[in-house]
Amino acid sequence: DPFTKGNSSLKPETGWHSDITVEQSIKDDRLFLSGSYFHWKVKDKIQWALDPAFVYTPQNLAGYRADGLELAATLRPVENLSLRMSYTATDAEEQKGTVWRRSAYTPTRQARADISFLTDSGIEVTTTSRYVGERNYYDGSNTTSTPSQVLGSYVTTDLKVEQRFQENWLVGFHANNIFDKGYDTYYGFFYDETFSKKAGTYTGAGRTFFVTAGFEY
């Protein structure tokens, strides 16, 4: 691969993670609330980035740390209906050289909402919407706090329909990104349809459908 190379001086990542969670159930589990605080600190975090020759190589960051808060609520207004919402705020920083900056590819805000309904015939229908905030990108020679690129925020929605048969069989239909929302996953080099080398964002998967079948025992 002409766009990647190894790094013989690469060091392994080391670090630790801690969190504390508070949970509360209300009205016989009709409402369930939780809140979590988390913190992590990593030394020699490995990150792929472009070097000055525009080749991707794994590099060690001088430091990586984060503090965050996650809030979640699950509501069951009736027996067969469940609504769950969660929100995560993450303050993540990485150190490149002597500069601390917002961590690459780590959104400061994320959210998720799930709605599940179970019919009397055993069919479960679930919709899941996810929000991902903006993410910074820095090329390998960038040692400032100014990002080389900023990947935009996005929202995607998935649909899942599952049916259980004879207790052990489970058949499902999945539709991911049902609104065919365009979004970017990371930044890099690629060849276009004319085989010209380009720099830009790689888009995420569009609308996809698939069917599953499983046996549980």
Image: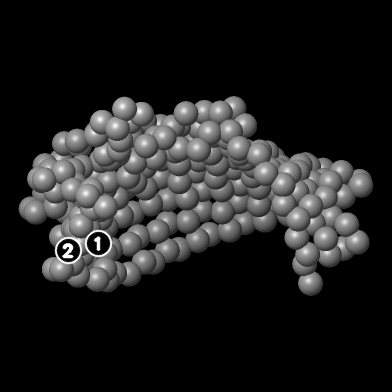
Q: Can residue 28 be seen in this view?
A: no
**Residue 62 locus on image (x, y percent):** 15, 60
The quarter of the picture where residue 46 lies is bottom left
Outermost residue to the left? 98
Q: Which residue is drawn at 65% across and 39% down?
A: 209
Say which of 80 and 194 sits in front. 194
Say which of 132 and 185 sits in front. 185
> Is 39 situated above or below 148?
below
User: What residue is shown with label 1?
Assistant: 45
User: Between marks 2 and 1, how big is the CA–CA gap?
Assistant: 14 Å
Name the mark nearer the viewer: 2 or 1.
2
> Is 102 situated above or below 156?
below
Side (left or right) of 58 relative to 32: left
The amino acid type, in three-letter code, at marker 1 is Lys
**Residue 123 locus on image (x, y percent):** 84, 46
The quarter of the picture where residue 193 lies is top left
